[in-house]
């Protein structure tokens, strides 16, 4: 189950996690924050915690907690709004180091990477290689990073969690079960708060106990997710490390029935496309850090312009970037035949990580809109400026 099929060679997967990433970056910029409780998020009581230091966690502060509660728990905390552009740059810096050395890697989020070094033991010790890469990242970026090395993604990720802060842990295949069994069920990545409380109400506290529950019962209680949770509790995970260069971008193009210079039509079409693919991005729980706009003139001359942006999946951020790129692209004032937009450099992540605004209402607004779209279709809620003439006449 953890071997390469037909070869008997044991998989060897590394998980790297940048510890309290946002806080660590802020401490690089301002060393006076070192050793002090730090909270990253919006500045008002109505905002939420995006990240916090270990010193703040000792007081019970956690990510996604209302800022008002965080202030009450840790009155002495230093609260910073956060700078996703800055964090994105440091995230890319780490990725570049990994890309220069790893045979196969996947950027799973802004602060997490998986690396497949299966077979490396035949040439160079996998433990030694992992240690050297981790030290190189620490040395060249100044950021603390923890690592887990094991036979699949799930066990490696859990091992990283046990290695924190700023540590490393190896779990060989023959020790996977002894490693997992005594741990709390909330160590399994798929188990959220609701699932945790449900399983605890069933008397299940440890991964070892969970692994002994009949898989049929898990499916009956939690559906297909129950089967996946059961597999992870038993150290089973066949998900591959997806190479960065195979990760798909997402985008769309529109060819006009008649070549046009109607700026209102061009603008509305662009906004409509961004709205559509940003929704798809959120449905896949992905963030983008690169947007490309494309135009093709009536003489078939084609131009594209690309811009790196802080990781996001929010329409209002992406629309602003797309409009800016279009204004820079459209200089010839010739008739346009086609317009397109594409998001790339995708990573897994939730929208909450991209927003450091004073009100969480924006996050809830997107969640409500997306919920309505899932129930009634994407066109149930669209921006007025993004409605094309055809949609206006034929809703």
Image (spheres, rainbow, N blue to C red):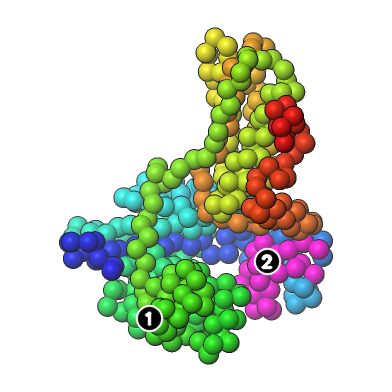
Graded by Cα atoms within 10 Å as few (under 14), some (14 to 19) or many (20 or more), the crowding at tag 2 reads some
Badges 2 and 1: C-beta atoms under 8 Å apart?
no
> In this rendering, would 348 be left or right of 150?
right
Q: Residue tagged by mark 2?
A: 64
x, y percent for residue 69: 77, 73
Residue 144 visible to an observer of this rendering: yes
Magenta region: which residues?
46-68
Residue 250: mark in rendering: none
Residue 112: say if magenta. no
User: In the depicted view, which residue is nearer to us: 340 or 224?
Assistant: 224
The quadrant of the image that shows the N terminus is bottom left
Magenta run includes residue 63: yes
Q: Residue at x 54, y 9 (%)?
A: 299
Q: CA distance from mark 2 to mark 1?
A: 29 Å
Secondary structure of the residue carrying tag 2 is loop
Q: Is residue 25 left or right of residue 262?
A: left
Is the residue 137 above or below the residue 152 in the image? above
| Element carrying mark 1 | helix
Q: Nearer the viewer, residue 49 or 243?
A: 243
Tell me where residue 242 appears, x and y as whole percent: 39, 51
Out of 64 and 73, give the one closest to the viewer: 64
């Amino acid at each position: 189950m953890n071997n390469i099929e037909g070869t008997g060679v044991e998989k060897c997967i590394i998980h790297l996690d940048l510890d309290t990433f946002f806080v660590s970056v802020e401490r690089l910029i301002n060393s006076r924050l070192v050793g002090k409780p730090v909270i990253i998020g919006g500045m008002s009581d109505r905002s939420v915690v995006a990240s916090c230091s270990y010193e703040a966690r000792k007081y019970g502060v956690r990510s996604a907690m209302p800022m008002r509660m965080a202030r009450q728990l840790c009155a002495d905390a230093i609260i910073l709004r956060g700078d996703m552009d800055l964090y994105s740059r440091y995230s890319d810096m780490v990725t570049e180091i990994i890309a220069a050395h790893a045979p196969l890697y996947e950027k799973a989020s802004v602060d997490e990477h998986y690396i497949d070094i299966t077979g490396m033991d035949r040439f160079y010790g996998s433990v030694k290689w992992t240690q050297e890469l981790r030290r190189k990242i620490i040395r060249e970026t100044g950021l603390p990073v923890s690592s887990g090395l094991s036979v699949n993604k799930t066990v490696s990720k859990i091992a990283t969690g046990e290695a924190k802060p700023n540590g490393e842990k190896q779990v060989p295949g023959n020790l996977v079960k002894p490693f997992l069994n005594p741990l709390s069920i909330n160590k399994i990545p798929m188990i959220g708060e609701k699932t945790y409380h449900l399983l605890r109400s069933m008397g299940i506290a440890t991964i070892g106990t969970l692994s002994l529950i009949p898989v049929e019962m898990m499916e009956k209680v939690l559906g297909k997710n129950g089967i996946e949770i059961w597999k992870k509790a038993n150290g089973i995970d066949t998900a591959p490390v997806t190479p960065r260069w195979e990760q798909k971008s997402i985008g769309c193009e529109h060819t006009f029935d008649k070549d046009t210079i109607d700026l209102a039509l061009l603008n509305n079409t662009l906004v409509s496309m961004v709205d559509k693919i940003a929704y798809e991005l959120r449905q896949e729980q992905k963030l983008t850090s690169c947007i490309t706009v494309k135009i093709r003139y009536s003489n078939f001359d084609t131009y594209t312009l690309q811009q790196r942006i802080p990781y996001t999946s929010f329409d209002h951020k992406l629309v602003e970037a797309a409009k800016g790129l279009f204004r820079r692209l459209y200089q010839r004032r010739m008739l346009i035949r086609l317009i397109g937009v594409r998001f790339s450099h995708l990573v897994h992540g939730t929208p909450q990580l991209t927003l450091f605004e004073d009100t969480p209402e924006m996050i809830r607004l997107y969640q409500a809109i997306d919920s309505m779209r899932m129930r009634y279709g994407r066109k149930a809620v669209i921006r007025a400026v993004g409605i094309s003439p055809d949609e206006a006449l034929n809703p």
